[in-house]
Image (cartoon, rainbow, N blue to C red):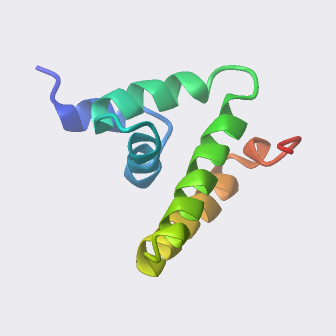
Amino acid sequence: MINANDILDMTCLTREEIAAIAEHEHISDIEAAEMGDYMMHIHHGPQVVQTMICDDIREALHKGDIAHARALYKTLADFIADHPDAARGNA
């Protein structure tokens, strides 16, 4: 039987990236994993995911949560390293 961890592991995204999508969209990690995996396979989808993570960083900074902003920045850096196409053409 497939459990929640299996679903999260079946995507091309890390747990941190999934959590950032869940935070941005106010949805569960399972829903974020499904959404994120879909986004990674459509035209300009990786750029949308990158924008979501950037929005989360901006929100954390706005709230004064520097530790969370730093963690999200690391998530963003890892995401761009793993998916360099996410940064191209994202204006």
Whole-percent x, y for residue 4 in the image: 19, 33
Task: Find the residue positioned furthest to the left.
Answer: 1
**Picture quadrant of residue 74:** bottom right
Q: Quarter holding the N terminus? A: top left
**Rendered position, 6 above or below 64:** above
Q: Quarter holding the C terminus? A: top right
Image check: 6 left or right of 18? left
Q: Residue at x 33, y 34 (%)?
A: 27
Image label count: 0
Q: Residue at x 65, y 46 (%)?
A: 50
- The answer to which of 73 and 4 lies nearer the viewer is 73
Q: Residue at x 31, y 38 (%)?
A: 29
Q: Residue at x 68, y 58 (%)?
A: 81
**Rendered position, 2 above or below 11:** above
**Picture quadrant of residue 6:** top left
**Rendered position, 51 above or below 72:** above
Whole-percent x, y for residue 65 in the image: 43, 75
Whole-percent x, y for residue 20 in the image: 45, 50
Image check: 73 left or right of 81? left
